[in-house]
Image: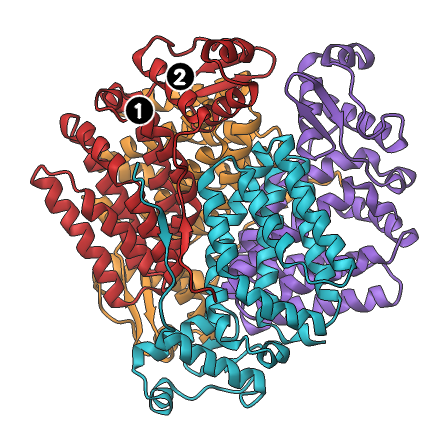
Chain colours: A cyan, B red, C purple, D orange
Amino acid sequence: MDSAPLVLSPGKRPRLSDQLYSQILEQIVSGRLSEGSRLPPEKEICEMFGVSRPVVRDALLRLRSDGLVQSRQGSGTFIQRRPAKRLSDFGGMDQVPEFLRVLELRMPVESEAARLAAERRTAAQLRKIEDAHRQMERDAEAGNIPAEPDAAFHNAIAAATGNDKFLSLSRSIQSSISSFRTVASNVTRTGPRKRIVQVLSEHTMILEAIQSRETEAARIAMMFHLERARRRVTDRSEDS
Amino acid sequence: MDSAPLVLSPGKRPRLSDQLYSQILEQIVSGRLSEGSRLPPEKEICEMFGVSRPVVRDALLRLRSDGLVQSRQGSGTFIQRRPAKRLSDFGGMDQVPEFLRVLELRMPVESEAARLAAERRTAAQLRKIEDAHRQMERDAEAGNIPAEPDAAFHNAIAAATGNDKFLSLSRSIQSSISSFRTVASNVTRTGPRKRIVQVLSEHTMILEAIQSRETEAARIAMMFHLERARRRVTDRSEDS
Amino acid sequence: MDSAPLVLSPGKRPRLSDQLYSQILEQIVSGRLSEGSRLPPEKEICEMFGVSRPVVRDALLRLRSDGLVQSRQGSGTFIQRRPAKRLSDFGGMDQVPEFLRVLELRMPVESEAARLAAERRTAAQLRKIEDAHRQMERDAEAGNIPAEPDAAFHNAIAAATGNDKFLSLSRSIQSSISSFRTVASNVTRTGPRKRIVQVLSEHTMILEAIQSRETEAARIAMMFHLERARRRVTDRSEDS
Amino acid sequence: MDSAPLVLSPGKRPRLSDQLYSQILEQIVSGRLSEGSRLPPEKEICEMFGVSRPVVRDALLRLRSDGLVQSRQGSGTFIQRRPAKRLSDFGGMDQVPEFLRVLELRMPVESEAARLAAERRTAAQLRKIEDAHRQMERDAEAGNIPAEPDAAFHNAIAAATGNDKFLSLSRSIQSSISSFRTVASNVTRTGPRKRIVQVLSEHTMILEAIQSRETEAARIAMMFHLERARRRVTDRSEDS
């Protein structure tokens, strides 16, 4: 097998469609584009932002995939959901598209990792998952934002698959989202405690399924957790 | 987001359990351990190979995951399937565990990529998938082993997700298995034409589903293709 | 196509392995078999209950599938989880195996139904799902146990697939579990309000995904809901 | 649990949208609507067939789901695939929508059944699956159309889940599609032998995965088989 390291390199500079995505997102968050209102037609958006049609289509496609807008055949594209304003306050808006793209990869990878971990984990591997979970609980109780134990929890599950490919990919993923985590942490620190309680409860369900070797339950719990993570980024209700 | 590249680094040297896996595999292939026969108990294997219990367990677990052996509660572990002898002739045996581990990661990642590609691919992205497919057909007709268009086919699907995370991971994966592909190619060159015809027919089903935007069909066709790829490595019937 | 109705007939009388399952379950609930303790070997269970080996194996297999016991290779079968005692108080114990078997079928069927509903639902079909949901919330606020709107919610989702096979199967399923629902309702009525709040929150997530046409989110939310339903039956923590 | 049998009742008479579906299908098969050509706008279809807008939408939605037509945003609906003409010759056209709807339910149910069968099947249950498979091979060699062993094969897998809900649903399903099978058999009898060889090869893959207890492989093989069955009904290439 090749000895060169597998590299998952991020784009050097933001793509045009990402910039457009962020700008539209910004306007949704600020309320300039309000829920239920219709986006201008593609052609107008092209002119407004000075970009080509494919760039607009790509940005709209992603807004749709992320559940922020909805297209109705024949009548246009409508704002469907309004993300938390506090995300914008902390300067995280331009990292949102990147974070969501990483999440899209994490969904299949980590739900399979959870399934394999439930099947194969040794007692020692389970202990590491439990340790990270407990550390995260302790940090939360102390009022800290438990970014590192969160990463450690996901990495420990990847390690428990017994397949080093899952582990090294998990590490890459966790390190790639660490700066976004800082933004999210600020949002959480100033926001409701509800959020961290929710994350911990989702982690608990994953952990319990891996403890009891219930493979399908582990897969479902992880999928649910990542789907909720996506929601926490794109859903305004997280403000309250 | 972090500017450091996401690295999916392979282990520097073969793990003990991989070496043990390969040695047992070698003996199954050579026929010294015949189909249906029982493996020695864990303790004996420890002594035979001078390794610890966890190493033996890990190797057996992987042999089981790969469908090569089967454990029956209370009566031991039995040889279940015998891989192609020609794999061993070309010196590929010690790359098998690594190849199978990569495959285990590819299953969730690439089946999701195929689903997303069927949903989102542009006309230009589709053309690249079709080009790779046609090139692979031409190579096969000319009697060549189409390693590069095979990689290009999978990378083009990853690109058609519109999510660069899938593309860079796909490239890493394809480059990491390129040396194994050479071995597999030699096996194929000297072997039956049936094999390459089979691979092309699986690719055709993936391509058709992406062409007609049938998301579930694309997901299923990719999953099936990778499951068959696993089978082609571990199944003796591929000799005939 | 055949004009005869598709019949999904339940067994006339409880199977031996179901009876054994219920009896072991009863003992776990009562605490006679405590968490972490080991079950007697298969042979002893045969003698204790006067049943054959296959019957014992089948009962143990189901207890394992339901996450109530766990087998550790070479060291036996251990009690892993203890269901809510109140389930036993209301005479529901012998309906548990049947309920769990129905749930096992519901998981694949209803998660696919939710996905299709998110893709295809018309405005009128969505309204019916919303109506059932609102009725269930109203019942819950009034302190009633919302059994009928719960069934109506699931049936409305099945109807929104546009495929009458899903609807008629859903109706069969809902009517087949209605008597168990009565037991579960009694458990809930006398129990913590937390439970109904939890069910409603799970339904809300399913509804939101269908509203916004997010197919994967709908599938995941339904899978999660049914997995939790399974947990609510087999998990003692629901007592508190 | 309720003692009344779970009934999965089919609609008494064909729905309007099914009739419309069949008529459009008929025209695609006959070639009056040729591949690549555009369907008239919804409003015109309403007038042509004297049906309401929702009926047209429902029929188009199903044609799209079945991969027969494709909608392109802003430019209309196009014929994408042309089913086997021989299906029409044998009078099976009006049964196609019902058959496809049953298939849509079978996909999630039977792929999960195959997974559970691979996990739980006893030696005796496996033997029944093998017997049905062998009988089907014998019938095919004798030039018969093996309708009964085909049903027996699927029912035996459902039985091997150990969950009687899967078995009774499978029996309902098999009996509901038996009259369509007769049509399909005539198509096959007069058609290429390739078709039955293909079906048998798909069954072999399912059987092997259940034999070797490979749960994911069994699930994938069943999903692939049913997806191909769908294709065999809607794909003209089956004529050749």
Q: x, y percentage for residue C58?
A: 67, 22
Q: Quadrant of residue C68?
A: top right
Q: Amino acid at mark 1?
A: Met
* Nearer to the camera, D120 or C146: D120
In the image, taking residue D77 as reference, residue C167 lies left or right, namely right
Res. D147 in view: no
Give the chain of mark 2: B
Q: Secondary structure at mark 2?
A: helix
Q: x, y percentage for residue C166?
A: 56, 52
Residue that mark 1 sits on: B93
Q: Quadrant of residue D239?
A: top left
* Nearer to the camera, C209 or D62: C209
Q: Amino acid at mark 2?
A: Ile
Residue visible at 79% across and 48% down in the picture: C181
Q: Is residue A161 above or below residue A83?
A: above
Residue visible at 71% across and 50% down in the picture: A135
In the image, taking residue C221 as reference, residue D216 lies left or right, namely left
In the image, taking residue B70 as reference, residue C79 lies left or right, namely right
Residue that mark 2 sits on: B24
Residue visible at 49% across and 17% down in the picture: D127
